Image (cartoon, helix red, strand yellow):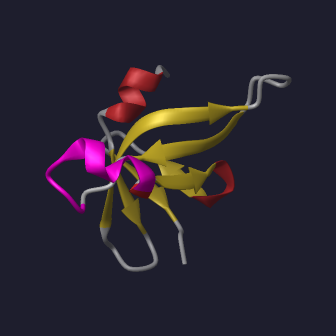
Amino acid sequence: MRLSDLQNKNLVNTSDGKNIGNIVDVNIDYKSGNINSFIIESKTNMFKFLNKDRDMEVRWEEIEKIGEDVILVNIK
């Protein structure tokens, strides 16, 4: 699976059913090559440059399932 495939999927929080957003970047461990987390674009403001500090990070351990259309995560 490519990063571009993941970027087209919405992230949904299973604890409250809310759509969290879309993946804009990935944090990778340079030694192992494993994905540590996804950076999720904030949806709070229409001006993207104002949201850069509000982007959210979803750790790999919080991902429950990567499906065809969505990625289910459990964030409390």
Write the residue at 50% across / 60% down.
Answer: 73
Q: Is residue 67 left or right of residue 31?
A: left
Residue 64, percent across and down? Answer: 56, 57
Q: Is residue 72 magenta?
A: no
Q: Please name whichever residue, 41 or 22, is drawn nearer the observer in this view of the structure.
A: 41
- Magenta residues span 44-53
Residue 30, compared with residue 74, is above or below; it is: above
Could you tell whether 54 is left or right of 65 in the image?
A: left
x 45%, y 57%: residue: 72
Is residue 1 positioned above or below 76 on the image? above
Residue 42 relative to residue 15: left or right = left
User: Is 47 one of the magenta-colored residues?
Assistant: yes
Query: Please, which residue is most extreme toward the front here?
Result: 50
Above/below status of 5 relative to 64: above
Q: How many marks?
A: 0
Residue found at x 53% / y 43%: 38
Give how far across and how far down residue 22 sits, in percent: 33, 45
In the image, residue 69 lies at what x, y percent?
30, 43
Left or right position of 2 against 21? right
The residue sitting at 46% across, 78% down in the picture is: 15
- Viewer-closest of 69 and 22: 22
Residue 65 on image: x %, y %: 51, 52
Q: Is residue 72 above or below residue 38?
A: below
Which quarter of the picture shows residue 14? bottom left
Screen quadrant of the C terminus? bottom right
